Image: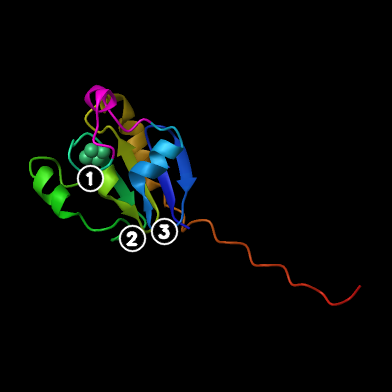
Amino acid sequence: MPVVRFVREGRELDCPAGTNLRELALAEGLELYGLKGRLGNCGGCGQCITCFVEVVAERQPGALSAPTAVEIKKLRRRPETWRLACQVLVLDSVAVLTRPQAGRGELEAQLETARLEPLPEGVIAAEPEEISDEL
Ligand code: FES
């Protein structure tokens, strides 16, 4: 099970492969949006362009689903490491920075640590216990 390291929040969350990154963050009460997005966002349709995240590290290339056509069009003028959380499926462990456009300066040490610290393979599902016939 992949792990998503949210650098700004100092949280690591595990999730099943294929989880939508926006839904994961919101389910855990993490703030994805700046003021504009909080006042009104598209609810995950890829239209408002307010759910930016920066991909800080991937356990391996392809840890996130490929950019969608919406992202390719809407993120033309943004850094290549930025994604729209609502368009991203988590396939392997990653580290991300929410709201990369806000308050980066004070996060440089955390970002550097997140880049260098190996990402876990993820939580391995526990083996089912063997059922004994003995009574
Ligand atoms: S929530 Fe609107 S673009 Fe992602």
* Quadrant where the C terminus is found in the figure: bottom right
Residue that badge 1 annotates: 83
Q: Earlier in the sequence, mark 2 or mark 3?
A: 3
- Vertically, is 52 above or below 40? below
- Residue drawn at x 42%, y 52% as measured from the top left: 119
The mark lying in front, picked from 2 and 1, is: 1
Few, some or many residues within 10 Å of mark 3 (<14, 14–19, 20+): some
The numbered dot on residue 60 is 2
Q: Amino acid at mark 2?
A: Gln
Quadrant of the rendered image holding ligand 1: top left
- Residue drawn at x 48%, y 58% as measured from the top left: 1
- Chief secondary structure of the magenta span? loop
Q: Position of residue 51 (x, y in %)?
A: 26, 37
Q: Is residue 40 visible?
A: yes
Which of 65 and 117 lies nearest the eye of the viewer?
65
- Residue drawn at x 15%, y 49% as measured from the top left: 70
Q: How was this image coloured?
A: rainbow
Residue that badge 3 annotates: 17
Q: Magenta residues, as a range?
A: 31-43
Q: Amino acid at mark 1?
A: Arg
Q: Position of residue 37 (x, y in %)?
A: 25, 28
